[in-house]
Image (cartoon, grey):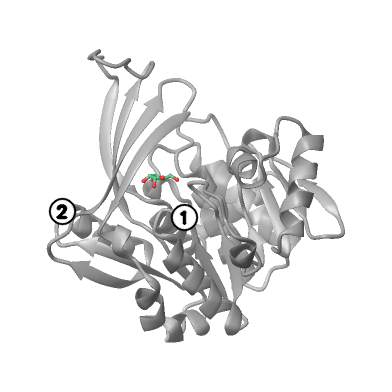
């Protein structure tokens, strides 16, 4: 069966520590809360897309361990189909999440584990699934080689490609030209372009510079300020949305990317899909955790309806 959205990316077991501040080197700090839950940018994006109504599959590698089991259980519940290689001698990805009490901001260290071995061959093995999809999405937690091969296969088959360049790293023009849609946040944009992104004017200049390097659409996410969309002709701002008090921003970018993929896969145009993605992200930050914070299609529809949007 063909899938509408195929995500290449990493699953990580997120160990979330909430505290007033980060400890300094050599210090032990008493925290406020701890929880363990599903994370990893690729998995979060796949869950967001599936819960938003898209028939979604994820390509990744897992270990044969407790976090690997957590991945399978989480995907089964969310309706994500695993196209997964289990590596018996390796561990599943894991992440340390520092959650700042009160603000919902975070700092993250992620170890992709078995997914560090994802390569072009994993993508070639799933070429039929990728080619049969409507939208292919990836990020940069797994090796670039796998991301590039996935984008190449998708582009050759006419599948819409989304690259969420997180965590940021320098990319070749060849890779950027394979992207229909590039979705960096402010800091990722600064790394990709070498330009500052502190004001709307600076964000517009950076979006223009990125577009010159090949992607058809630049969607620069601006956190609580919404997003900027440049398609080579028009520079448009996408208004932010508020769905309630912000408790945890972990995975907000993933919610946005998954929502965008689901919107586009449903046949909605870019403007509608960006509105949908913004709503998915707005709801996700009102809930704790990453994968577990993704809203259902009904939640999003109800929120947009209530907000008259
Ligand atoms: O984008 C948030 C995610 O980044 C977390 O779930 C963590 O696992 C890291 O991959």
Q: Secondary structure at mark 2?
A: helix
Q: Specify the quadrant that holds the N terminus.
A: bottom left
Residue 84 badge: none
Write the residue at 62% across / 82% down. 158
Badge nearest the viewer, 2 or 1 = 1
Q: Where is mark 2, residue-wise?
A: 66
Does label 2 point to a residue whose CB lies under 8 Å from ligand 1?
no
Look at the picture and state if 30 lies above or below 39.
above
Q: Nearer the viewer, residue 56 or 166?
A: 166
Write the residue at 51% across / 83% down. 131
What whole-number distance in Å separates the C-alpha atoms at marks 2 and 1? 24 Å
Which quarter of the picture shows residue 106?
top left
> In which quadrant of this rendering is ligand 1 seen?
top left
Determine whether, in the image, residue 86 is placed left or right of residue 256.
left
Look at the picture and state if 190 lies above or below 264.
above
Is residue 77 in view? yes
Q: Where is mark 1, residue-wise?
A: 140
Which quarter of the picture shows residue 239?
top right
């Amino acid at each position: 069966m063909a899938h509408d959205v195929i995500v290449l990316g990493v699953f990580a077991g997120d160990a979330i520590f909430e505290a007033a501040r980060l400890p300094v080197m050599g210090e032990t700090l008493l925290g406020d809360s701890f929880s363990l839950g599903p994370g990893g940018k690729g998995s979060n994006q796949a869950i967001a897309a599936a819960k938003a109504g898209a028939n979604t599959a994820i390509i990744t590698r897992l270990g044969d361990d407790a976090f690997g089991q957590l991945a399978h259980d989480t995907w089964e519940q969310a309706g994500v189909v695993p196209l997964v290689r289990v590596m018996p001698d390796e561990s599943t990805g894991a992440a340390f999440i520092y959650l700042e009490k009160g603000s919902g901001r975070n700092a993250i260290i992620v170890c992709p584990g078995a997914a560090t071995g994802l390569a072009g061959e994993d993508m070639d093995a799933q070429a039929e699934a990728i080619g049969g999809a409507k939208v292919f999405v990836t990020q940069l937690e797994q090796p670039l080689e796998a991301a590039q091969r996935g984008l190449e296969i998708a582009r050759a088959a006419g599948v819409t490609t989304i690259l969420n360049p997180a965590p940021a790293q320098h990319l070749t023009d060849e890779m950027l030209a394979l992207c229909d849609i590039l979705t960096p946040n402010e800091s990722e944009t600064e790394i990709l372009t070498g330009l500052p992104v502190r004001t709307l004017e600076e964000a517009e200049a950076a979006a223009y510079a990125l577009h010159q390097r090949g992607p058809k659409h630049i969607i620069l996410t601006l956190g609580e300020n919404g997003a900027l969309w440049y398609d080579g002709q028009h520079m448009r701002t996408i208004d932010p949305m508020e769905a309630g008090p912000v408790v945890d921003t972990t995975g907000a970018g993933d919610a946005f990317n998954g929502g965008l993929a689901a919107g586009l896969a449903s046949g909605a145009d870019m403007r509608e899909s960006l509105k949908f993605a913004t709503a998915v992200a707005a709801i996700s930050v009102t809930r704790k955790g990453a994968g577990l914070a993704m809203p259902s299609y009904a939640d999003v529809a109800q929120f947009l309806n209530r907000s008259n949007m």
